[in-house]
Each structure stands twice: as structure tokens, then as C-alpha cells.
Amino acid sequence: MSFAKASVRDAEVAGRRVLVRADFNVPLDGGKVTDDTRIRAALPTLELLRERGAALILCSHLGRPKGKAVPELSLRPVAERLSGLLGTEVRLAPSVIGGDVELLARALGPGEVLLLENTRFEAGETENDPKLAEALAELADLYVNDAFGAAHRAHASTEGVAHHLQGYAGLLLERELSELGQVVNSPKRPLVVVLGGAKVSDKIGVIDRFLEIADQILIGGAMCFSFFRAQGIATGNSLVEEEGIKLAEEALKRAEESHCELRLPVDLTLGREFAADTERQESDGVEVPDGWMGLDVGPRTAESYAEAIAAAGTVLWNGPMGAFELAPFAAGTRRVAEAVAAAPGTTVIGGGDSVAALVQFGLGDQVDWLSTGGGASLELLEGKKLPGVEALLDKDAVDKEASHG
Ligand code: ADP
Ligand code: MG
């Protein structure tokens, strides 16, 4: 399957005002951006547009202000950081829409950059209010969506606005779709999918899809306890998602009929409680005694998962193997991260915490693709359509236009 949406590279932008939806939902501390990965990820699209003589009107959400202007969630720190990264002034608008914003937008010259305030200061953003979408559209001549991390949401700035302006895919959005699409559509084999994290219910859609596509699924994290409960194995005080037990049971059944091998941990690292200074022990099997909880996969599991990863043509990893934030329980996640970093196959990582773990271990630059979208990457991998992508122009539409003109 080829990527069928129109690319920003094919847009006529010289002398035009372009509304760019980016994902600037970055962590802040005391009015400063503490991790600018997402801002940097938007730079290729912004630089391309400036080089081609577009005037840029940028927008993004930040946190959850719930439809009100919340000063702590202003995009001012983003404007400052972006200004430094682009090497040009990035002016912050006083609000998302309104007369003052229109004047600022109209006054922009080629290469100049205006950042609108946090789109979620407007209640209409998450409600996908057509009035807000129209007001945003009025600011510009065309629309570029580069906010992969928000593309699974049908909001005014991610979806609604594309009903009023011709919409193109930004370079980051395109790259995300092609990297994640490749894993699903034409993976080098064997395809090994490593899934961990807290809940089965978050990842069951991905498990189902990959039981049909992958060669192996390796399960770790707290979600393995739902599988163990489904098998009648004691889990002690481990974190178990009750709703996940049924889902796990069904997945185990489907796995029996699938050619894909669904693997569970064979040993665990246990603690008394969720704390770094808790009493710790390795368990030989996977039964968790009363008074203990499983906080990481054990060393034999980590080693055999690492071997599968080393032998893979493609590795997709989503979700840590244990409570990696607690140093005594980070070993399983670290072993998997090291194996992924060293793997000769194609390696694609999705999920906020798995990406954070890789970066924490200093291995972030040793994989092929780190997805910027947690929820969006899961939905895409599940095979769902992303509203922020669907609303963009089809590639054919642009080709036709070009051949007529
Ligand atoms: P991602 O963001 O990569 O998709 P998740 O959000 O699904 O990952 O899960 C990450 C969380 O899961 C981490 O906070 C981690 O502490 C927790 N976790 C993983 N394994 C365990 C475990 N055995 N017990 C408790 N929490 C766990
Ligand atoms: Mg997470």
C-alpha cells in the first residue's frame, strides 16, 4: 500500500499563508520546555515551507486546559524554543482566533512565523466545532497537518479545518505513516512484536492485529499478569487489570489458531511493593507468592526475548517490560532496549514510556524509528483510520490538478 495523501512537498506555497498543525504538546517545568523532541520533529516541515516562501501560522494543543485560557498552559515557552531552533522570530498570538489574530496573520510576510495560542483554550477544539474550524481556516490559504501525535483525534485543528482548506500531510506525519505502515504491510521477516506496559486493554487491538501479521509476539510488563490469571496462575499482589483477564483469555484462544507465536515471561523479578527500596527477589517461575508483586520480567525471559529480537528482520516495540522507573526493576526493559538498539533488523518503537526508556538508557539514536505518537501509533497499528489523516487531500487530487494546470 502506498501512501495516498497529498504531501506538503507537492503544495504550491510561495507567497501563501499556510496553517500548520504541529504537535507541540511538550513537557514543561517552571515555564521552560524540558524536552523539545516534538518541537524538533516539526522542523523539517517548517523549514521546507519557509524556504519555499510561505508565511507560517502554527497551531498546537498543550495539555488539558479544558476550553479556557490557562496561563500555565500558554504556548509561550514553545514560541521561545522554536524561535531559537528556527533562528527567526516566532511571534505568539494573544489567542487562538479573533480580530487581533486575523490582523497578525494578514500582516505576515514570506518566511515569517506566527504561533497561535493553545488550541484547547477554545472549547470548540475538542468538540470539533465547525465554527472554530472555519475561523482557523480563514487565517490561511492552505493547511498542513504535521501533528501525528494528535492525528487520532477528530478535533477542529486536526480534522475540522481540513473541510475548509485544502489539507496536505507534513513531512513528519508522512514519515510516521510510512515507517509504521511498513511494519504492518511489508515487514522484513521474521516480524517480532514486543509488547509491555500497564494494561492489556490498551494493547489488545494491536495484539489481535499482529496475531495475524507477526511471527512472534513477546509479552512483558504488568499486562502479562492478566494472561497468567487467564491461565489460572497466581499473581500475588501484582498489578492486574481485571477487565484484561477476559481479553487475555480470548487472545490466548486466537493465538492457538494463529501461525503467530504468543510468548509470555518464564521468570519474574518480584518486589514487596511498588517502590525502589522495597525487598526484591528473583522468582524461578511465574507464580507470584502472596505478599509479593511482579515488577519486572526475570533474567531468563529478558535473555530469550533479546535473542528473538536479534534474529528478527523487523522489531516493533511498544511498552516497557517492567516498572523501569524504579532502578531495581529496570533490568528487563534495559535488556530489551539494548537488544533492540543492537538488532540488525528494522527497529520501530512506539509508546511514550518505551521511547522514554530508550532515551533514558542513551539508546534513542540507535533505532530506525522512534514514533512521536503514543495513542496515534497504537490506533494506526490496530488498522484504524486516523481522522487527522483521512481529512487531508488525496494524492490523486493533486496530480490531477497539476496535469490540468
Ligand atoms: P507505553 O507508554 O510505552 O505505551 P504504557 O503506558 O502502556 O507504556 O506502560 C508504562 C507503565 O507500565 C510504566 O509506568 C510502568 O511502570 C508500568 N509497568 C510495567 N510493568 C509493570 C509491572 N510489572 N508492575 C507495575 N507497573 C508496571
Ligand atoms: Mg504510557
Image (tube, helix red, strand yellow):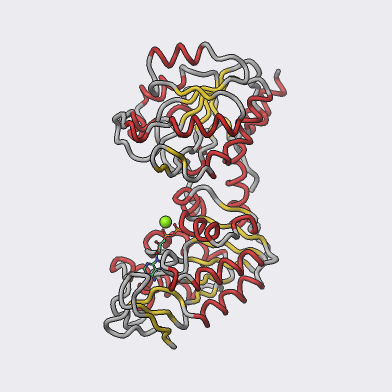
Ligand 1, seen in the image, is in the quarter at bottom left
Q: Residue at x 29, y 66 (%)?
A: 243
Percent position (x, y) of residue 171?
A: 62, 38
* Residue 1: percent from left, percent from top: 64, 48
Q: Where is residue 2? Give x, y as percent.
A: 65, 45
- Picture layout, residue 146 above or below residue 209: above
151 up-or-down from 230: above or below: above
Residue shown at the point (50%, 51%) measured from the top left: 377
Q: Is residue 46 visible?
A: yes
Q: Is residue 192 above or below residue 37?
A: below
**Residue 239 at x, y percent in the picture:** 32, 70
Q: Residue at x 62, y 51 (%)?
A: 179
Establish if 48 lies above or below 212. above
Residue 112 placement: quadrant: top right
Name the side, left or right, on which 112 lies relative to 236.
right
Quarter-of-image position of residue 272: bottom left
Left or right: where does residue 154 sit relative to residue 211?
left
Q: Residue at x 58, y 41 (%)?
A: 41
Residue 230 shows in this picture: no
Location of the C terminus (image quadrant): top right
- The residue closer to the viewer here, 84 or 273, is 84
Q: Nearer the viewer, residue 271 or 243?
A: 271
